[in-house]
Amino acid sequence: MRTIVIGSTKHLLFAALYGAVGIAVAIIFTAVWFLNNRPDLSLWHTTHLTHEYHQQSGLTSFKQYLSLEDKLFAEVDRKIYRKYQPKVASALNRYERHSLSDPALWQQNWNRSFEWENPQAEFGILLLHGMSDSPYVMKHIAEHYQYQAHIVGLRLPGHGTVPSGLTDITWPDLAGAVSLATTHLAAELPGKPIYVIGFSTGAALALNHELENISLNKPTSFAGMVFLSPAVGLAPIAAGAYWQAKLGRLLGQDKLYWNSIQTEYDPFRYQSFAVNAGDVVYRLTLRNQTLLTGLDDKQFNAIPAILTFQSVVDDTVSSISVVDKLYQYLPERRGHELVLFDVNRNHNHNQLLMQDPLIPFAPFWVTSPLPYRLSLLENNSHANNQVQVRELTHVSKAKGAEIHELDLTWPNEVYSLSHVALTFPIEDSLYGPLVTDESDKIQIGRGIYQGERGILSVSAADMLRQKWNPFYPYMMGRMDEFTQQRPSI
């Protein structure tokens, strides 16, 4: 009897094992089929550019970086714009000359690095865009400070050219370019403070630059850091990007190198997203967490003052990680500030919320006082769409918190900000909602079409995503206060 039971158990275990393996294989093949059942790759997805910067390029100055960039864009012109011959012309393809999305239509090609020198500069500013973006993301901030500062807007490696540029970059490549630009600014402005303003991955790179210095007990580079929608933490699914790329290489399936393959209608941002790009950001955030957890008290005090702007809802990076993995570790009395944009708590919108996005933050705000200045931009309870700022330095005494009413309102149809919205004012001609007289250029902010789902190559979710910041004037005012403090390096 015992022999029969043991034999039956073995058979059951083997059957369960074979069944699990079979299910796993079926899932993998289904996933591969699904990922391959997408639009065909285009020339800009498969072309390899040889003049892109990598950490091993051996460059020692920012001027060499710009020189290499000149060669890179000449290569793009030769391999893409001159070579691409569509059977049917498209008015919305950035890689077709004279289309509405052609970057050459803009007075300045914002896909390129730029430097605005200023002999009377009070300070320097380094602008760092996010993953799949371009320096255009920082355009309005650059214009705001052009009469006060010497400005460098860095095009990160892999960006501004073709989406395939993101298939083989590494985070050290990005960090190497940041180092070159930072060294250049410091040399141009001896004795003057340098600030860095980073959006998303750009913020993570700025943080990494200083953490690497501090961990080695080297001097820091920046007098202060401004973060917009910073990539401090990502969803756990980001860890799977590496294995998807591995599977694509193993099976020889090029489409598996891509999370999304879309029409490239945006002149200054890739719509297609390479799997490797997500892995790069994930590894960068892991590196920053490793560095943060390894600092001692003295090293923590060396972190320059940080001012962060973050929406409480963000589908690209983790909003809660800004507090959980960064701000809760920062020391007191260092001038750190966090500005959170709440959702629009208009009565009608409140009825539709699946859950209150502020609830996960509550456990981190029981400390009184907080070691940083916390400002919550929220609805004025007495006026539906009017907004106010609640200063919550003592959360346990929130009822007595200092409140500032703003002369700003939520647009009626907008229920929240988004990851990509923060850096653009309503006046932005590309992403803003206002009608312009530039009929020869695409205006993405007004491109909302109605009809049946599943027909257009641009998803309804992308069209409806908030693309500009109603509170941009307040954000810039806080940024001005921060840079006017002029802390010493």
Image (cartoon, rainbow, N blue to C red):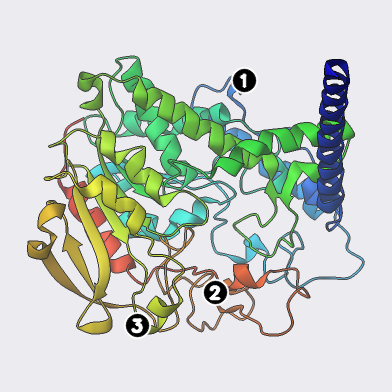
**Residue 75 position in % (x across, y down):** 74, 42
Is 204 placed left or right of 372 in the picture?
right
Q: Secondary structure at mark 2?
A: helix
Q: Amino acid at mark 2?
A: Gly
Q: CA distance from mark 1 to mark 2?
A: 39 Å
Q: Residue at x 81, y 47 (%)?
A: 31
**Count of labels shown?**
3
Q: Secondary structure at mark 1?
A: helix
> Tag on residue 56?
1
Which residue is outermost to the right? 87
Q: Where is residue 57, by image quadrant? A: top right
Which residue is outermost to the left? 400
Q: Residue at x 49, y 59 (%)?
A: 420
Q: Nearer the viewer, mark 1 or mark 3?
A: 3
- Can residue 42 be seen here? The reply is no
**Which one is earlier in the sequence, the residue at label 1 or at label 3?**
1
Placement of 108 over or under 8, stated as above or below = below
> Tag on residue 347?
3
**Residue 376 position in % (x across, y down):** 25, 61
Q: Which residue is mark 2?
A: 445
Q: CA distance from mark 1 to mark 3?
A: 55 Å
Q: Amino acid at mark 3?
A: His
**Residue 322 position in % (x across, y down):** 36, 45
Q: Nearer the viewer, mark 1 or mark 2?
A: 2
Is 157 placed left or right of 296 in the picture?
right
Q: Residue at x 52, y 45 (%)?
A: 113
Q: Secondary structure at mark 3?
A: helix
Q: Where is residue 329, by image quadrant? A: top left
Is 260 placed left or right of 123 in the picture?
right
